[in-house]
Amino acid sequence: MRTAKPQFESLEKCLSDHLPPKELAEVKRILYGKDIPKLDINVETKRLAEEHDFEIQSYNFEANVEQLRAPRIVKIGLIQNQIVLPTTSPVKAQQDALYNRIATLIKAAASCGVNILCLQEAWTMPFAFCTRERLPWCEFAESAEEGPSIVFIQKLCVQYNMVIVSPILERDNNNGEVLWNTAVVISNTGHVLGKHRKNHIPRVGDFNESTYYMEGNTGHPVFQTHFGRIAINICYGRHHPQNWLMFGVNGAEVVFNPSATVGDLSEPLWGIEARNAAIANSYFTCAINRVGTEVFPQEFTSGDGQPAHRDFGHFYGSSYVTGPDGSRTPGLSRTRDGLLVAQLDLNLCRQMKDSWGFRLTQRLDLYAKSLTEATNGDHVPQII
Ligand SMILES: NC(=O)NCCC(=O)O
């Protein structure tokens, strides 16, 4: 499915098209931090990208050389994509078309040597939660342990020796068949390492997700993978600094933020929140957003005074990676499917803890005490 109306392609493209090189370098330094060198993309990956019409960008986050620790190099991949078939197509056809598309993008990630890959929020379906309709959308839900997309991804994990974070609509068959918004972590040996359920559920604009599932009950798990410690802060959780904080407290080195969000609502916040989280928590963050405009069969409203409509607005892509030093990659396109590859030296996390000291100075004990008091029913604000 193609974008409904012509869209602005990307902030970075606009800047480099219109600024002289010297000014561009200064603007980038101030907006994005130190320059992240590009990594070469091999011929096979470029061929895949051209043949299958997706964008590919690749960067290298370097760290200082240490005397006692070897560099801890890991390659991560972020995939953003449009849905493939119209939302009126049979459910199975929509699923199969998405599997097909994602298989190609994952193949490209493998040919770049990606070790850990994350897909976008609810990648197995259109983001139909705006509609508040039950059918057919609930039919996309599946077991996080043995659902069809899990089995599909497990095979790719083994084939490519890759850890894959697969955000799906979960149906918990052991507990009343209720739905959750869940990210499943599948190891490079094809085992389900665990899952995390979205902690913060939006109630804004057309994001009527609370009609389908409740706030997650899995806390803030960090997954020890073969390639590093990762966590997942699903979409709306990125507006909650405490959510990011807890993944850091639990030792994450890379936090993925698989999302589905639209321009009118959140775009000015997009470049700030995940990036700030990387700085404050001394880890890498990876913000991933879907692309395109998804049109639904029936009109819907969301009680916000807008006329009835059949689409959510434009999902603006713009996926990017930030390092713990605040440096960030450019975003992928606002309009095209894409793969963003970043080589990280995880040693940068501790190096930032040592130099800036945010983990040393963050005063968790003070806030634990103050928050305990503030969440008491009889809290009196400290106003003097
Ligand atoms: N998927 C989701 O939680 N979207 C909410 C909108 C936003 O956080 O920008």
Image (spheres, rainbow, N blue to C red):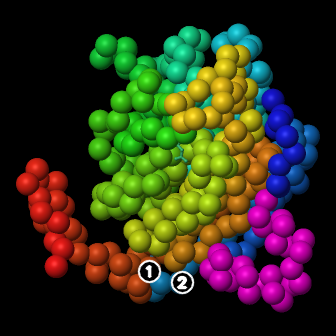
Quadrant of residue 379 in the image? Answer: bottom left
Marks 2 and 1: in contact by CB < 8 Å? Answer: yes
Q: Residues within 10 Å of mark 1 (few under 14, many from 20)?
A: some
Locate the N terminus by quadrant.
top right
**Is any atom of residue 356 visible in this view?**
yes
First in sequence: mark 1 vs mark 2: 2
Q: Which secondary structure, mark 1? A: helix
As rendered, which of 134 and 51 lies closer to the eye?
134
Label of residue 340 in the image: none
Residue 20 sits inside the magenta stretch: yes
Label of residue 351 in the image: 1
Residue 13 sits inside the magenta stretch: yes
For the residue marked with disc 2, what is the amino acid?
Asn
Residue at the spot of label 2: 64
User: Which residue is located at x 85 percent, y 40 percent?
Assistant: 5
- Percent position of residue 205, x then y: 55, 39
